[in-house]
Amino acid sequence: MAEAILLSTAYLPPIQYVAKFLQFKQVWLESDENFPKQTYRNRAVILTANGPEAIMIPVDRHGRDRVKIRDIEISYATPWQHVHWQAIASAYGSTPFFEELADEFRPFYEQKFKFLFDFNLQLLHTVFGILEIAPKIHLTEQFEGVPAECMNFRQAIHPKPHRALADPAFVCTPYTQAFYPRFPFIPNLSIIDLLFNCGSESFEKIFSCKQ
């Protein structure tokens, strides 16, 4: 099995994505690809009172069709930060660990970041801090320059099931979610679904997901 994996950037990524940082000794993040639409790069899926809901960060490509992911700018033409935080607070306000962890995430919905890649990376490091892990992360320098003996997984984790690739190394471990039993367990939502529901037990839950 490869000791390294190549992933895309992701906004509040699903549990499967975070599990890769425990499964592999080194993780590369793609920073040179052209920005693709309708992926986890700028959207996350949370569990609301109405079921799973995608929240998306609007981006500004300045009229260009092809823009490197590291150069994609966040658009503030709409109050998406307020909308996202309200959605998160409404979805998870009653979960066991929301009050404890809310201040870790709230600043990302109050401060303005210019670039999506930087926003996602700092948010990811916040998640790592909560999980108390410090994985080795490298950034690619050119597209298609996949490091030797590195599994290319940058398109594999996808919000559309028909576009996601099979991943036998990941099976999501069930945990108690908000709105149960209204909804049966919904696997592989945003990592914040796990954190707000399980708190300090989140690391063990993620670790048990990797096969």
Image: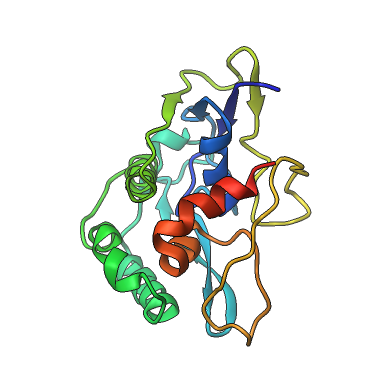
- In the rendered image, is residue 58 in sight? no
The residue depicted at 66 percent of the width and 72 percent of the height is 185
Foreground pick, 75 / 133: 133
Q: Is residue 78 left or right of residue 111?
A: right
Picture residue at 55% right of the left edge, 54% below the top:
205
| Colour scheme shown | rainbow
Is residue 34 placed above or below 119 in the rendered structure?
A: above
In the picture, the quarter occupied by the N terminus is: top right
Q: Is residue 31 left or right of residue 122?
A: right
- Front residue of 82/47: it is 47
Toward the viewer: 22 or 190? 22
* Residue in view at x 74 percent, y 56 percent: 161
Horizontal arrangement in the rendering, residue 169 relative to residue 60 (left or right):
right
Instruction: Please state the horizontal and vertical placement of residue 57, each as a whole percent of the image.
Output: 43, 58
Quadrant for residue 20, please give it: top right
The residue sitting at 22% across, 62% down in the picture is 110
Q: Position of residue 64 (x, y in %)?
A: 47, 41
Compared with residue 175, is residue 139 higher up or lower down, i.e. above or below? above
Residue 134 lies in what quarter of the image?
top left
Residue 197, position as x, y percentages in the image: 46, 69
Q: Is residue 164 left or right of residue 89?
A: right
Q: Quadrant of residue 87?
A: bottom left
